[in-house]
Amino acid sequence: MKRKIKYYRLLWLKYDLPAGISVFFVALPLCLGIALASEAPLYSGILSGIIGGVVVSLISGSQLSVSGPAAGLTTLVISAIFTLGNFELFLLSVAIAGLFQLFLGIFKLGSLAYYFPSSVIKGMLAAIGIILILKQIPIALGYDKPNFWENGMLNIFESKNFIGNVIDLNKQFTRGTILISIASLVILIIFNSKILKKFKVIPSSLIVVVFGIIINIILVNITSNYFNNYSLKQTQLVNISPDIFNQIQLPSFSRIFENKMIWKYGIMIGLLATLETLLCVEAIDKLDKRNRITPANRELVAQGIGNMLCGILGAIPITAVVVRGAANVDAGARSKMAAFTHGLLLLLSVLFLTFFINKIPFASLSSILIITGYNLSKPKLFYNMWSLGLKQFLPFIITIIGVLTTDLLIGVSIGLLISIYYIVRNNFKAEYEISNANIDGEYFECIKLNTNVTFLNKVNLRKILDKVPENSSFAIDGSNSKFIDYDILEIISEFENKAKYKNIKLKLIGIEKVNINAIH
């Protein structure tokens, strides 16, 4: 037993501790940035990271994935907070989302998420990426008010407030903020390039944050009148109270049945968090050199408990996150103790390092989020989807347009309907073929039914049978069919009766006759 404990201790010291430190430096700015993008209290982002690291990692069956606040949920979080009116009611939705995920995991329904078409999921994430970029541009320019886009991506352009917002944005421009934003974007682009990515030791997000702090300190300490215009205002810097635990807002459980939108957003957050988690876990499993597979249902149980705690303790919702998981793998993590270590370090940072965190400019965080948004919606993705054909591209692009012009639920629903349309259309084409056949020495025009023929084929089959000319020979071959729907058999039986009056010589092969008179 002692030998086993010593082995795990050495494993943690050699691999998981350095990996946990590396992931911590990636996660800290992202936790703050995603809370900023979600228009939630900044501490709630760090709390999410702590819960994802300390709690979810221990319950999860994944050895390498890392959980925390996710960019993919920002749009939904903003909409929920704005619609519900305050953060305390929103936290109820987060707790319900966790309960929903726990339900999926316990009843082994995790596989349901895999039934969403990849084109719709990619469209949803791309739309979130575009929204993320649009929302961070005002902050990167120095706008320190959180409501520039609060009326939605479409309505804002029709709103009388838009011109006022643009004028206000122009007044809010800060030279120092723009300087930090441009420099931060350049650093992120250079350090994430293929050449430097191979040699990267320090996370680029940490470099950006440290750089932003140093530049702001230099600008503040320059006394000339010209350079004074470059210094940042206090509202353009992170502000977390050193006594963070007294600042935390808790959910209003007595109001849980007050508004049905609390439950609606809870289910929506739970479903989206489930999709993003399962996609992430699948991606991280592919990076695992030991080929370990994460049990999906256990992961949902872990995420469900984590999100319930987030709702109860005042944090924004979490998912497994690709960026943190990939950083964990790159840093050489061997077990879930790396993710646990990163969560522990986040906890220590809010207890002892708030003086450092409060010097971080929002411009640095917004630059990180702009690049995150770009990675979700890069032009290469659009080109790849186009190259796959309209059946993939149309659901993808319509989902994006739907999410941008309405909301996440309606946009994804529209994308799903387009995907279902193509499935039904393909079903029409795939379940039969028409050819000439020689049957017992006589030639027939033959319609051959394939595999499964359902009621979805009724319209096209009826059209074909109605076009069969009088005084002809026609065969319907169902010998290869494993299933023929009763509705199809009914149409065939009706045609058999009409064939006698049209002098059509009809041959049925492998098809059970239906007594249509018994129906009436």
Image (cartoon, rainbow, N blue to C red):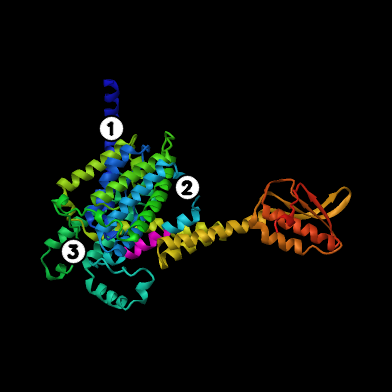
Q: Is residue 319 visible?
A: no
| N-terminal label among 1 and 2 | 1
**Which numbered circle lies on residue 112?**
2
Q: Are marks 1 and 3 in contact (CB under 8 Å)?
A: no
Residue 275 position, x and y percent, is 42, 50
Q: Residue 467 placed where, x, y %?
A: 77, 64
Q: Quadrant of residue 287?
A: top left
Provide the secondary structure element on which disc 1 rests.
helix
Image quarter where the N terminus lies is top left
Kind of residue at badge 3:
Thr
Residue 347, magenta (yes or no): no
**Cα separation between marks 1 and 3:** 40 Å
Q: Are marks 3 and 2 in contact (CB under 8 Å)?
A: no
In the displayed structure image, the side of residue 413 where residue 455 appears, left or right: right
Amino acid at dot 1 = Trp
Answer with mark 1 or mark 3, whichever residue precedes in sequence: 1
**Which dot marks residue 12?**
1
Measured from the top left, where is residue 19 in percent x and y? 30, 39
Please indicate, yes or no, whether residue 312 appears anywhere in the rendered image.
Answer: yes
Amino acid at the residue labelled 2? Leu
Secondary structure mostly seen in magenta is helix
Q: Quadrant of the C terminus?
A: bottom right
Residue with the mark numbered 3: 235
